[in-house]
Amino acid sequence: MTYQETLEYLYNRLPMFSRIGSAAYKKDLTNTIELCSFLGNPENKFKTIHIAGTNGKGSVSHMLAAILQKAGYKTGLYTSPHLKDFRERIKINGELISEAFVVSFTQQIDPMISKISPSFFEITVAMAFQYFADNKVDIAVIETGLGGRLDSTNVITPEISVITNIGWDHMNLLGDTLKAIAGEKAGIIKKQVPVVIGETQPETKQVFLEKAHTENAPISFADHARYTANWQYDHHLLHLDIMEIANQQITQYKLDLSGYYQAKNLVTVLEAVNQLQKKGWKLNQEEIHQGLEHTKKITGLHGRWETIHLHPQVILDVAHNEAGMKQIVAQLELMQFKNLHIIIGMVKDKDVDKVLSLLPPNARYYFTRAQIPRAMPEDMLAEKAKAFNLTGKHYKEVHEAIADALQHSVNEDLILICGSVFLIGEVEPGKIKGN
């Protein structure tokens, strides 16, 4: 098979969460364990960092990978979903997995596909483990897909575990209280493995403390160790003064991930780095600063408050749940613009009403959809939005919406595209023509 034929086989043969939703979710690790066993347990042949959380886990994963790479470690990175290219999910030192490996691995694993009918995600996790093992990475940053306890990635014993935060998302699968969702995420906490919690939340703190105690795992809360003392934007970089609470020392960091919400993620990353240093990983201040300032360039991360056009400013953000949208609305309040245009598309299994209720009524809306079965029809989304005084037209695909937004904007306006990772993945910056 060619690479393209292999991808079509994987997409069509295997249940894929991004396309069909919860029907693709496997509620145990049996398939992953069998796949790894078939491959000779590649997940045990390299060091890992395991990252879970409702929001921020992608940014934290990429920042940590950038720092490790700058420190000279051969660094694997597994994240999901991808925006443009399947190979974005699996990288070593910022380089995408080779097409040849995707083809050869799929051929190798095909007997198991027929035997156990794994999900698309289970296969990609096994593929990542095999690729990292074959290429002898020093360490790999592994982002969970959904939850933690039953996530396919949860067959590793990492150097450290990181849980960024807990919010309302995937309640149909993870539970309908923050405590229940935290219990699922806490499933990545392993015996005697240090765990970093990014945000202290009253509803979830005890869940993590109890699980860490059960596993005899050292636990630290990132926001108990550091906080943002000051910040400013300069030349598309976010400058943050981070105060270390223990010694009252301030250090300034520059991030090329420019959304202010990255301040919380930075605090989480710095505590993770601190725990890695305690375990003997050599990460000096210069390497930390360089990794953070050039994360996008080093790892290829996109879609986090990303400006893709100026005059008018067009920004992409993958925010798609309540916590993410709260961060977006807070970010908008920091921005200067004449008129606000919001292009939004969502999937059917999100709490759409909750997200819509957070959005500002004083924007012009363009309702659209990603080209996947899970997407909420654009006319249905527009109808739901009326209940929250959000008005605008609807469009069958995102570039129609962008073209109309550009036509109705002036140079001082801001156009935000958000609501679904898959919608952001369909945006092609090269197609955007200004006024």
Image (cartoon, grey):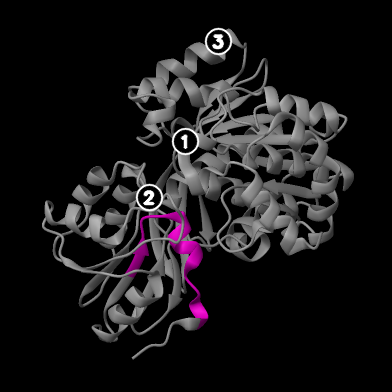
Quadrant (top left/top right/bottom left/bottom right) for the N terminus: bottom right
Are there few (<14), some (14-19), or many (20+) residues within 10 Å of tag 3?
A: few
Question: Does 356 sit left or right of 283 as displayed?
Answer: left
Report the span colored magenta.
Answer: 416-430
Considering the numbered disc 1 on the image, is that residue within a helix, a strand or a loop?
helix
- The residue singled out by tag 2 in the image is 347
Q: Is residue 423 magenta?
A: yes
Q: Residue 213 carries which label?
A: 3
Q: What residue sits 43% from the left and 62% below the top? A: 305
Tell which circle, 3 or 2, labels the residue nearer the N-terminal end.
3
- Residue 52 position, x and y percent, is 54, 35
Above or below: residue 154 compared with residue 237: above
Amino acid found under the numbered disc labelled 2: Val
- The residue singled out by tag 1 in the image is 22
- Residue 393 position, x and y percent, is 21, 70
Q: Can residue 285 be seen in this view?
A: no
- How much space separates mark 2 and mark 1, taking CA atoms? 12 Å
For residue 14, which quarter of the picture?
top right
- How much space separates mark 3 and mark 2, taking CA atoms? 38 Å
Above or below: residue 95 compared with residue 406: above
Q: Is residue 435 visible?
A: yes
**Residue lying farthest bottom?**
435
Question: Does 421 sit left or right of 393 as displayed?
Answer: right
Q: What residue sits 60% from the left and 51% below the top? A: 63
